[in-house]
Image (tube, rainbow, N blue to C red):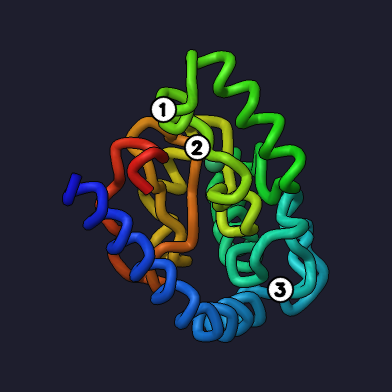
Amino acid sequence: MSDRTGSKQNRATLRVRAGAVSTLIASAAVLSASLLAPATGSAVPLGSTESALGTGGLNPALALAYTLAETEAHNVGVPLSITSGYRTYEEQEQLWINGINTYGGPDNARRWVLPPNESSHVAGDAIDVGPISGAQWLQANGNRWGLCRMYENEWWHFELATIPGGVCPAMLPDASWG
Ligand SMILES: [Zn+2]
């Protein structure tokens, strides 16, 4: 199973890199927010401290990157919102138990849901978004803020996985590869 091991290592390296650039992302994002901020009153609720709905509990760099992306999506008329962001250990454990029941065992369940100690949602490092049109827009444009779709079988799941303006890593087939 060297392929799986390799992909785990790549993923781990990627996470370390994403962590290392989060300060850079945060600075760049704050700068972008101030550049985007309207000089006078506006219908856009953009105050630089305003975070998008659903970003509570997330890694601050992810919350900021997503907030900027969602603001831009709405500016260009694309519907986009978080359907699931940070989850507690207990919430993820219930999802995991439900997944085992739904998919007939842990091996199949892992393709769709991970146990709480492995879930990037519990770590505050992942968001699920909707509707599908918004997710498709984010897949095409999210790299501007470092946001990437991670799995071929989950059109809704995004993480901070590159530097702003960088290239997103190749998608993994499903979460069991992560
Ligand atoms: Zn997810």
Taking the view exactly as shown, the residue that stands out farthest to the right is 41
Callout 3: 10 Å neighbours few (<14), some, many (20+)? Answer: some
Q: Residue, x 62% and y 58% (percent of image)?
A: 123
Q: Which residue is mark 3?
A: 38
Q: Report how many numbered discs are placed on residues in the image.
A: 3
Q: Secondary structure at mark 2?
A: strand
Residue in the foreground of this view, choosing between 147 and 46: 147
Residue 37 vs 131, above or below: the answer is below
Q: Earlier in the sequence, mark 3 or mark 1?
A: 3
Mark 2 residue's CB less than 8 Å from ligand 1: yes
**Image marks 3 and 1: residues in contact by CB distance under 8 Å:** no
**Image marks 1 and 2: residues in contact by CB distance under 8 Å:** no
Disc 1 residue type (three-letter) = Asp
Q: Which residue is mark 2?
A: 156
Residue 50: x %, y % from top left: 78, 66
Q: Quadrant of the N terminus?
A: top left
Quarter of the figure with residue 69? bottom right
Taking the view exactly as shown, the residue that stands out farthest to the left is 2
